[in-house]
Amino acid sequence: MGNIILIESALSFLGLGIRPPLASWGNMLTGAMDVVWSAPLMAFWPGAAIFATVLGFNLLGDGLQRALDPKGQTALSG
């Protein structure tokens, strides 16, 4: 899921994905490039949202894999 979000954001940033006026984090980053020196937070917040969402999905996937994969569990010897 995280990879899909990154790909969609990158394609929208490059102008190959979702077209404005539809909302997309890639479109928000593209719009912020014009004012990045005068209003840097306009580029920071969509980038931070992409980062947090992708990180969250990756951590969720890792946690589910550890919880549901019976081969990944090892017996404690003690």
Image (cartoon, rainbow, N blue to C red):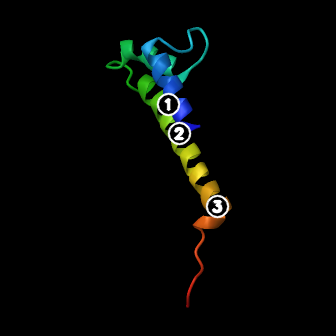
Q: Residues within 10 Å of mark 1 (few under 14, many from 20)?
A: some
Foreground pick, 62 / 22: 62
Q: Residue at x 49, y 30 (%)?
A: 6
Point out residue 16 in the picture as x, y percentages from the top left corner: 49, 12
Q: Are marks 1 and 2 in contact (CB under 8 Å)?
A: yes
What is the spatial separation of the Cα atoms under label 1 and label 3, in whole angstroms?
A: 26 Å
Q: Earlier in the sequence, mark 3 or mark 2?
A: 2
**Residue, disc 1:** 6
| Secondary element at image label 2 | helix
Point out residue 24 in the picture as x, y percentages from the top left corner: 56, 20
Disc 1 marks a residue whose amino acid type is Leu
What is the spatial separation of the Cα atoms under label 3 and label 2, in whole angstroms?
A: 22 Å
Disc 2 marks a residue whose amino acid type is Val
Q: Closer to us: mark 3 or mark 2?
A: 3
Image quadrant of residue 70? bottom right
Q: Residue at x 48, y 19 (%)?
A: 11
The dot on residue 54 is: 2
Question: Height in image: 68 above or below 60?
Answer: below
Q: Earlier in the sequence, mark 1 or mark 2?
A: 1
Question: Height in image: 73 above or below 20?
Answer: below
| Secondary element at image label 3 | loop
**Residue, disc 3:** 69
Q: Earlier in the sequence, mark 1 or mark 3?
A: 1
Question: Height in image: 20 above or below 45?
Answer: above
Position of 54 with respect to 71 (left or right) is: left
What is the spatial separation of the Cα atoms under label 1 and label 2, in whole angstroms?
A: 7 Å
Farthest residue, direction bottom:
78
Disc 3 marks a residue whose amino acid type is Asp
Q: Residues within 10 Å of mark 3 (few under 14, many from 20)?
A: few
Total of numbered circles in the picture? 3
Foreground pick, 48 / 69: 69
